[in-house]
Amino acid sequence: QSQPKPTRRGALIVVEGLDRAGKSSQCEMLREYILKQGNAVKYIRFPDRTTPIGQLIDNYLRGSANQDDHSIHLLFSANRWEVAKSIEQDIASGITVIVDRYSYSGAVYSAAKANPTLSLEWAWQPELGLPRPDICLFLSISAQEAAKRGGYGTERYENETMQTRVRELFRTLFDRQEDIAIIDAGESLDEVSKDIQKAVSDCIARLDSIGPLRV
Ligand code: DGP
Ligand code: NA
Ligand code: NA
């Protein structure tokens, strides 16, 4: 008897890093790589500035509107929650989803502010329950190196003091999280891309294999 062929699920791949770490270029190179391997792939980014919530975030980041730190934090989180279902549907239907920034940025950028009631622990809570990435690729670059790369833009957070604090908090958060791959983003585009391809291939191979029972 012939069984219907099951749909192999897609992977959820998150790319994180400081501003100027090269996320956008690497996401595009990774998208082409996955496509070349014959897999369906979709690229999304957070914040998604096109939704009504995203427009509030955009105004905040450009400095044309102010928001309470907690309030803007919850809007960033809501901006992820509004597409959570569609991410889950895509993955179930076999599409690999590449996400440019996710909950990790969400928690650390907010916690990096000098606000005593906005800890990393507080900032992580609204993220609980969102789809868990199969892998988070952290494009690692120092704040000084980032500053050298053509300089920062003019948006909120795009300064060396903030980026240094963000980098420290990423490290703290990653000590508590699984499935983080630290990628040295100081190398050439092609070298970084190769390292990413290796990490992603290993991750996808794990998706296919059955794991051992654990305590
Ligand atoms: P980008 O469009 O990738 O340059 O990101 C916009 C900026 O917003 C960037 O400095 C990182 C920051 N950011 C991204 N997600 C969040 C979040 O959930 N909360 C906060 N506070 N900042 C975030
Ligand atoms: Na930016
Ligand atoms: Na804080």
Image (cartoon, rainbow, N blue to C red):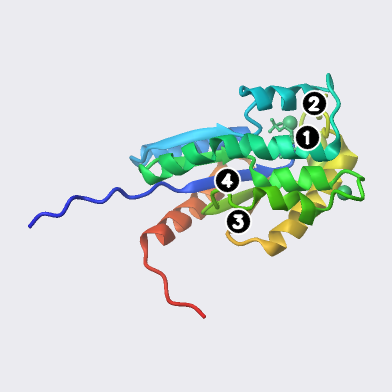
Determine whether the beta carbon of the residue marked 3 sits less than 8 angstroms from the nearest atom of ligand 1.
no
Q: How far apart, in angstroms, are the residues tagged by discs 1 and 2? A: 8 Å
Q: How far apart, in angstroms, are the residues tagged by discs 2 and 4? A: 24 Å
In the picture, the disc for residue 14 is 4
Question: What residue is pinned by disc 2?
Answer: 60
Amino acid under disc 3 = Ala
**Which numbered disc, 3 or 4, marks the residue that appears first in the sequence?**
4
**Which numbered disc, 3 or 2, marks the residue that appears first in the sequence?**
2
Residue in the image at 86% along x and 41% along y: 162
**Which numbered disc, 1 or 3, marks the residue that appears first in the sequence?**
1
Secondary structure state at the residue bearing disc 1? helix
Q: Is residue 32 left or right of residue 22?
A: left
Q: How far apart, in angstroms, are the residues tagged by discs 1 and 4? A: 22 Å
* Labels 1 & 3 near each other (Cβ < 8 A): no
Look at the image and tell me in which quarter the N terminus lies: bottom left
Q: Residues within 10 Å of mark 4 (few under 14, many from 20)?
A: many
Amino acid under disc 2 = Tyr
In the picture, the disc for residue 181 is 3
Question: What residue is pinned by disc 1?
Answer: 72
**Which numbered disc, 1 or 4, marks the residue that appears first in the sequence?**
4
